[in-house]
Image: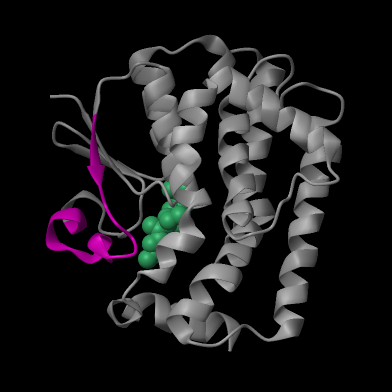
Amino acid sequence: MPLELFLDLLSQPCRSVYIFAKKNNIPHEFKKISLMEEDHYGEEFGKVNPMRKVPAIRDGDFCLSESVAILMYMVDKYKTDDHWYPADLQKRARVNEYLAWQPMGIRMHGSKIFWINIMVPKIMGRGVPEDKKKAAIDDLNGSLKMIEEKFLQDRPFIAGDQISLADLVAIVEVYQPVGGGIDVFEGRPKLSAWRDRVRQEVGPALFDEVHKRILGAQEMVKGLDASKMAASKRRFLAMFF
Ligand SMILES: N[C@@H](CCC(=O)N[C@@H](CS)C(=O)NCC(=O)O)C(=O)O
């Protein structure tokens, strides 16, 4: 049986897992879990991931969550090309350094912009207070600066001359606020050039296909039934109001 991937491409870590599986021709079955429909609270998915987060995978009777663990599982199981997770001590350490930084370093900030601009108005029926919006933008700008100045410096990719897991995990997060209507590439030539390199390495068709859902999120959200999103409502209430 192929690897079952439980994903929603609105989610950044789902996009990195999916790009990696497709790019490396890993046999898989895409099982769509719609976060907007709150499918992740269903009984079937609860058996795959009791934490009720995507991505998650099932390989026979082995279930695994957490995108970084899933990516590494695929690296090990399918013996993918070295550049994804280099054996070289210091290159691997660069990848690990980024992977360790990113959850609080950018993921949180990019996600917030998406929620503030797209999800909160729809689900709560009102906007986030201006001071919280401004703080979120400042945080995001700080994260993007860190990617450019600390993680990329003058290298084509985070670990050096070749694309690695770090670049995949990074690019999907950088796109989340873009889905929230903020063009993070404007006025950032270094970030834009890196994005172009990553897109080229992944393959433009695959890259664009995977990002279609997040880039169309503003339109998609208009048709949502907010009354079905009780869990998100509780979370936004605690976070922003
Ligand atoms: N650290 C986890 C994060 C997983 C995660 O937070 N997924 C989000 C989507 S991006 C989710 O499933 N959210 C559903 C919810 O919290 O209700 C990973 O990298 O896989």
Residue 61: in magenta span: no
Residue 33: in magenta span: yes
Q: How many labels, in total?
A: 0
Q: Would you place residue 209 above or below residue 123 in this image?
A: above
Location of residue 132 (image quadrant): bottom right
Give me the residue at 47% from left, 85% from top.
124
Ligand 1 falls in which quarter?
bottom left
Front residue of 63 and 187? 187
Front residue of 200 and 29? 200
Q: Would you place residue 40 above or below residue 192 in this image?
A: below
Q: Position of residue 163 (x, y in %)?
A: 63, 20
The quadrant the N terminus occupies is top left
Residue 67 seen by the camera: no
Q: Would you place residue 26 above or below residue 239 in this image?
A: above
Give me the residue at 21% from left, 49% from top.
48
Q: Where is residue 104 in the image (x, y as percent from the top left)?
A: 64, 56
What range is drawn magenta here? 29-46
Give me the residue at 84% from left, 36% from top.
189
Q: Where is residue 229 in the image (x, y as percent from the top left)?
A: 33, 76
Q: Would you place residue 38 above or below residue 96 in this image?
A: below
Whether residue 230 sits left or right of residue 233 in the image: it is left
Residue 100 seen by the camera: yes
The quadrant the C terminus occupies is bottom right
Q: Position of residue 83 (x, y in %)?
A: 58, 14
Location of residue 15 (image quadrant): top left
Give me the residue at 25% from left, 27% from top.
28
Colour pattern of the rendering: one colour
Location of residue 149 (image quadrant): top right
